[in-house]
Amino acid sequence: MSDYKVKFVDYPAQYKAHKKELDTAWQKVMEGGDFILREDVEKFEKNLADYVGTKYALGVNSGTDALTICIKALGISFNNEVITSSHTFWATIEAIENCKARAVLTDTDNGLMNMDDVHYAISRATRAIIPVHIAGSVCDMERLKFIADSQHIPIIEDAAQALGAVKPIGLAQCFSFYPAKILGGIGDGGAITTNDEDFYNLCKLFRNHGGKPQPQIVGFNSRLDNIQAAILNVKIKYLPEVLLMRKQIADRYNKGLTGLVELPKERLVYQDYIIYLPQRDTLKSYLEKEGIETMVNEYPFPHFYEKGPKTIKYEKETLRLPCNETLTDSQIDYVIEKIRSFFAQ
C-alpha cells in the first residue's frame, strides 16, 4: 500500500514543519558555493559536541563511516577481534569487517548487549568493544566500562539510534543522520564525538584523504556535506522539542495498549516505539490493510555470522510502530484503535 493513513516516517511533513528555515539554509549554501568542509560543517560540529557533552565532534559521510574511522584510528586490523551486539544493523559488523578484523557477537537482553556475554567474549585478540544503543535504549555502560577498563579495552559506542540518550562514557560515540533518524538530514551523514584530542585529530586525518592537501596516512573521502550540515543546524535546534513529542507519543501508546501487548521499557528517547507479541507478522499484515505503516525489528546478517538465540526470538516477536513528531493525536489513536480491534477478533 502506498497511500498510508499513518506513515512510519512522513518526510514531507517534517520538511513543511520548518520549511522556511530549511529553504533559507540550503539556498545560502547554493548561493555561496560553500559545499565541502565549510562554515556550516564547523558550526554543526560545535552544536553537536555541545549537545552530546564532548569536547570534539567530527562530521563524516555516514554512521557506517564513523564506526569504520574509529576502528581504523585504533589500529585494528588482521587477527584482531571487536566485540559487539548481535542485535544491530549490519553496518556495525560491516565496519569491523572492512577493517579486516573479526566481529565477536554477544547475545542480547531486550535488544541490548548482554554484559555477561561481553565478559566471556574477551580474548587476547580483543581490541575494542562496540556496544549498540538501539531504538533510543542505552546499554549498561557503567558495567561495560568496568569490564573494559579492567582489560584496558577501548569502547566505541554505536549511538546511531540514540542521540539524546547517550552520555559520553566510551572513547567515542558514532552517530547517523540518515533521514529516518531522530535527527535526520536529507541524505546520508554521520559524526564522531569524543573527549580525546589525539583520537579526534587522527580521525580527522582519516576523514579527509589522510590529511589533505598533505596526506600523512591512507585515509578516506568521508566528509559531511556542507548542505547536510546546514540542514542539520536547523533541525538540531528543535531536537529537545522533538524528543519530548516522541516521549508524549510513547506515553499515549502506553496508555492505549496496556494489557494488549508487552510494551517497551520506559526510556528518555524513542527512536522507535517497539511492541512485543508472538503474532507479530499477523498484526503487521492487519495494520497494513488498515493503512498503517509499521516495520519489523529484524536486522539480517550474511550466513557467516550467527545471532544469539535471545536476539533471534526478540527480533521475531517485536514490531516498530510509527513514532515521530509529525504524528497527530488522531493518527496515534487510530493506530491504537486498530490494534485493539485486532485483539478483539
Image (cartoon, rainbow, N blue to C red):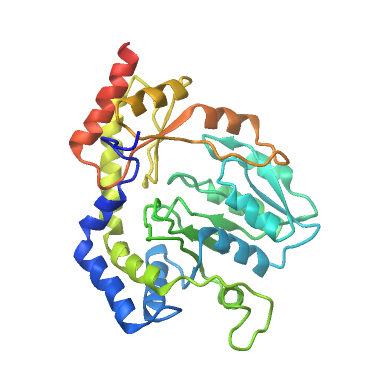
Which is nearer the eye, 279 or 310?
Answer: 279
Left or right position of 278 against 258:
right
**Image point 33% across, 67% down: which residue?**
231
List the single residue furthest toward the front.
2
Percent across and percent down for residue 237 are: 28, 64
Q: Residue at x 28, y 17 (%)?
A: 341
Task: Look at the image and tell me whether residue 128 can be seen.
Answer: no
Left or right of 107 in this view: 239: left
Q: Quadrant of the N terminus?
A: top left
Farthest residue to the bottom: give it. 214
Q: Quadrant of the C terminus?
A: top left
- Residue 193 percent across, percent down from the top left: 49, 66
Instruction: Tell me if residue 65 comes above or below residue 161 in the rendering.
Output: below
Q: Please count the marks in the image.
A: 0
Residue 220, horizontal then vertical, whole percent: 61, 72
Q: Is residue 255 above or below residue 133?
A: above
| Residue 277 picture quarter | top left
70 or 91, nearer to the observer: 91
Residue at x-position 74% and y-position 56%: 101
Q: Quadrant of residue 129?
A: bottom right
- Residue drawn 63% across and 88% down? 214
Q: Could you tell me if residue 233 is visible in this image? A: yes
Q: Left or right: 280 with respect to 90?
A: left
State whether residue 221 is above or below residue 178: below
Q: Residue 6 lies in what quarter of the image? A: top left
Is residue 324 toward the left or the right of residue 158 in the image?
Answer: left
